[in-house]
Image (cartoon, rainbow, N blue to C red):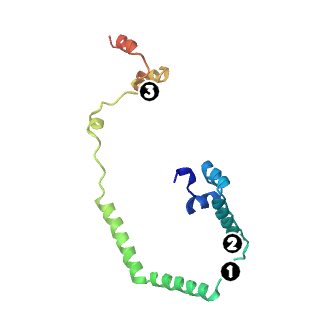
Amino acid sequence: MSEACRHLDDERLLIALYGAGKEEDSAHLQACPECAARLRRLEGRRAAWLSAPAPAPDASRLRAQREAVFRQIERSRRPLWVAVRAGALACAILAAVLLQRPAAPPAEMAAAPALSDQQLFEDLATMIARDTPMAAEPLMALFTPQAEMEMQNQ
């Protein structure tokens, strides 16, 4: 049987029912009376289900669910476990505070010479006066022609 003669499966029919089908599925539905009838039956069932009133909730079932939730809440409120958890958390925080040591500064920062205010001002003025920020120069180098780069390197 060729691909064009195959009927749509249930999944593709459901997708078509909700309007998300492919164009080829729509074309098949227009050409195939059997698939179109199956789609109409699905549409009828969907319309009947949507128009039917929702069943009233069962009061005894809701009460049983509520009681089960309250029992679970009461089980989780055991004071001994709450105290154990709080004590473990306090011990962990205390250990973290006592064992925490500040990291030593990096070697390059410790050995770096102190800059004067005048040198810092001159460096900032030079950076502000530049057309292209220093951080962007490697990126800009990607777009310069190779001949210009060779001339700059000489």
Location of residue 119 in the rendering, given as x and y in whole percent from the top left corner: 39, 24
Location of residue 8 in the rendering, given as x and y in whole percent from the top left corner: 58, 58
Instruction: Give the secondary structure at mark 1.
Output: loop
Residue named by callout 3: 136
Residue at the location (69% across, 64% down)?
40
Q: Estimate the spatial distance between the alpha carbons at disc 2 and disc 3, rounded to whole Å.
A: 63 Å
Instruction: Give the secondary structure at mark 3.
Output: helix
Circle 2: residue type: Trp
Residue named by callout 1: 55
Crowding at dot 3, Cα within 10 Å, few <14 / some 14-19 / many 20+, comes out as few
Say if 21 sits above or below 39 in the image: above
Q: Estimate the spatial distance between the alpha carbons at disc 1 and disc 3, rounded to whole Å.
A: 67 Å
Circle 3: residue type: Ala
Residue named by callout 2: 49
Q: Earlier in the sequence, mark 1 or mark 3?
A: 1
Q: Earlier in the sequence, mark 2 or mark 3?
A: 2
* Quarter of image, res 75: bottom left
Q: Estimate the spatial distance between the alpha carbons at disc 1 and disc 2, rounded to whole Å.
A: 12 Å
Location of residue 52 in the rendering, given as x and y in whole percent from the top left corner: 72, 75
* Quarter of image, res 88: bottom left
Q: Earlier in the sequence, mark 1 or mark 2?
A: 2
Crowding at dot 2, Cα within 10 Å, few <14 / some 14-19 / many 20+, comes out as few
